[in-house]
Image (cartoon, rainbow, N blue to C red):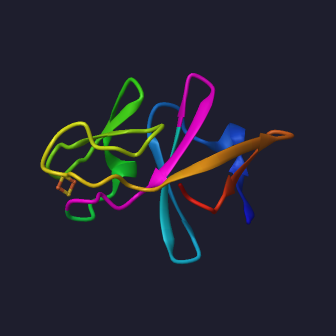
Amino acid sequence: MRVEITDLDKLPADRGLKVTVGEERIALFKIDGSVYAIGDRCSHAEASLAEGELWDRSVECPRHGSEFDLETGVPASLPATAPVPVYDVVIEDGKVFLDMESS
Ligand code: FES
């Protein structure tokens, strides 16, 4: 299922945007013109990853500091050990869509 999220121009650069689609909380990041979407709830204790600090192509959880890869959702550092969902992003006609079949 493809869901329209926002205009590409309205996504903040180099920081996260939290959106909710149905029951799912999703963190979007626009970095160097590319858009990434991962589950917003940290797999350790559910902090909002959209509020984390960006490091290249990863985001640092604001609560305990695990770093999640924005392309795979896999944490590269403890205390989180489980990945967060990753969503396919489609950009068409200046709009950002998410494919809600997470991987
Ligand atoms: S809540 Fe994210 S590392 Fe603990």
Task: State left or right for residue 50 relative to residue 30.
Answer: left
Whether residue 38 appears in magenta in the rendering, the answer is: yes
Residue 93 position (above or below residue 19): above
The residue lying at 41 percent from left, 58 percent from top is 40
Viewer-closest of 5 and 89? 89
Quarter of the image where one finds residue 45: bottom left
Which quarter of the frame holds ligand 1? bottom left
Quadrant in which residue 54 is drawn? top left
Point 17% across, 52% down: residue: 63
Q: Residue furthest right?
A: 93
Q: Residue furthest bottom?
A: 23
Q: In the visual, does 17 lie left or right of 44? A: right
Image quarter of the N terminus: bottom right
On screen, 102 above or below 64?
below
As drawn, is 46 to the left or to the right of 13? left
Q: Position of residue 20 (x, y in %)?
A: 54, 68
| Total count of labels | 0
Q: Is residue 47 magenta?
A: no
Report the span colored magenta.
Answer: 30-44
Q: Can you say whether 36 is above or below 38 in the image?
A: above
| Residue 25 rendering spot, x and y as whole percentages | 47, 66
Image coordinates of residue 38 in percent, x first then y, are 47, 51
Q: Residue at x 60, y 42 (%)?
A: 11
Instruction: Please state which of residues 69 and 93 is positioned toward the viewer in this rendering.
Output: 69
Query: Which x, y percent locates residue 95?
Result: 77, 45
